[in-house]
Image: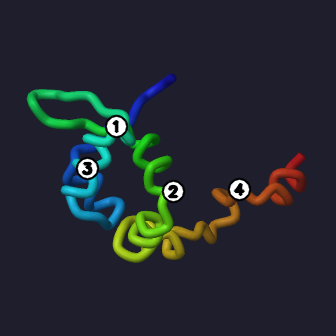
Amino acid sequence: MGNVIRVSVSEAARLFGVETKTIRRAIKAEQLKYIVVQSRYKINFSSLLEWSQGKTTTKNKLNKSGIGQYVDKWKIKNRLYSPNPKILEDTK
């Protein structure tokens, strides 16, 4: 499975633009995969992504208040690091 990324409840809430009680409700409803480390939830990031895409309201909050609001700013403009398939074909 490789390296698993886990985040705390507060980190998940900040990243996805929701309240911590929303994350806790999802944990209680067994919608998220998690482990308990020193009496604190550590949530599997991939399960958070799946959960966030399940409801339209959660998806909108991710894009409006969460990490999704920054995606447009991350566009890679340097051709050397661009995943453009045409560039890869030109180098062959």
What is the spatial separation of the Cα atoms under label 3 and label 1, in whole angstroms? 9 Å
At 25% from the left and 50% from the top, the residue drawn is 25
Of circles 3 and 2, which is in front?
3
What is the spatial separation of the Cα atoms under label 4 and label 1, in whole angstroms? 36 Å
**Residue hosting label 4:** 83
Expressed as whole percent of the image width and height from the top left, the position of residue 66 reads 36, 67
Disc 3 and disc 1 in contact, CB within 8 angstroms: no
Looking at marks 2 and 1 on the same chain, the residue that comes earlier in the sequence is marked by 1
Looking at marks 2 and 4 on the same chain, the residue that comes earlier in the sequence is marked by 2
Residue 25, numbered label: 3
Residue 53, numbered label: 2
Looking at marks 4 and 1 on the same chain, the residue that comes earlier in the sequence is marked by 1
What is the spatial separation of the Cα atoms under label 2 and label 4, in whole angstroms? 24 Å
**Picture colour scheme:** rainbow
Q: Residues within 10 Å of mark 1 (few under 14, many from 20)?
A: few
**Residue hosting label 1:** 30
Amino acid under label 4?
Answer: Pro
Expressed as whole percent of the image width and height from the top left, the position of residue 2 reads 48, 24
Disc 2 and disc 4 in contact, CB within 8 angstroms: no
Whether residue 70 is visible, yes or no, is: no
Compared to residue 84, the image places residue 44 above or below, namely: above
At 17% from the left and 28% from the top, the residue drawn is 37
